[in-house]
Image (spheres, rainbow, N blue to C red):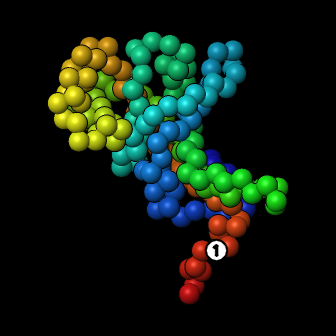
Amino acid sequence: MFRPMRRSRQQLSQAEAEAVMARGKSGVLAVLGDGGYPYAVPLSYLWQEGRIYFHCAPEGHKLDAIRACGRVSFCVIDQDEILPERFTTCFRSAIAFGRARIVESDEERRTAIDRLAEKYSPNMPEAKAAEIGSAWNHLCMVCIDVEHLTGKEAIELAAARPSENQ
């Protein structure tokens, strides 16, 4: 169902692709939008045990698209250094494919928003509790259950890695 990477020497291991997802601060969600046009939107997220969580308003283009077709992709860029003298970039990224769903369980929603808040505003328990409490009734959480994850890096980075056979 998912294509093999054409430049397989540049493919990250599963663990490395997961590390990219865990380190990332923002990613781009791509959905099938209105009129069959792709709709891609940057957002903050949480990577948690093979799932991606994000929060959003309880209505809008993103949620309409997810309700119509839950198949999505989510891309995170871990590194992107321009090498002008070589006409290239030194990049590392990961892309996840999966099915998005609106989180219905209050327990899952609470756990996800607590961890998301801790990621972006660590060590602020009182402020976190107040913010979540004030937004709770209007808070929509979405979970992407990842079905396929792959990562890739520039050939320059791949060539600098120790060989697995060493």
Above or below residue 8? Residue 84 is above
Residue drawn at x 67%, y 26% as measured from the top left: 38
Residue drawn at x 57%, y 85% as measured from the top left: 165
Residue 90 in percent (x, y) is at 68, 58
Q: Please state which of residues 73 and 116 is positioned toward the viewer in this rendering.
A: 116
Residue drawn at x 32%, y 14% as measured from the top left: 138
Above or below residue 155? Residue 102 is above
Quadrant of the rendering where the C terminus is positioned: bottom right
Q: Does residue 156 appear to the left or right of 113 in the view shown?
A: right
Residue 117 in percent (x, y) is at 31, 34
Q: Does residue 134 appear to the left or right of 8 in the view shown?
A: left
Q: Quadrant of residue 31?
A: top right
Identify the residue at the far front of this view: 85
Read off the residue under disc 1: 160
Element class at badge 1: helix
Q: Tag 1: Cα neighbours inside 10 Å, few (<14), some, or many (≥20)?
A: few
Above or below residue 83? Residue 121 is above
Q: Please state which of residues 23 and 15 is positioned toward the viewer in this rendering.
A: 23
Above or below residue 12? Residue 70 is above
Q: Quadrant of residue 30?
A: top right
Instruction: Specify the amino acid type for callout 1.
Output: Ala
Residue 55 in percent (x, y) is at 39, 26
Q: Does residue 68 appear to the left or right of 152 in the view shown?
A: left
In this orientation, does residue 95 appear? Answer: no
Q: Quadrant of residue 161?
A: bottom right
Identify the residue at the far bottom of this view: 166
Q: Does residue 30 appear to the left or right of 112 in the view shown?
A: right
Q: Please give the count of numbered marks on the rendered protein.
A: 1
Residue drawn at x 73%, y 61% as measured from the top left: 7
In this orientation, does residue 26 appear? Answer: yes
Residue 102 in percent (x, y) is at 39, 25
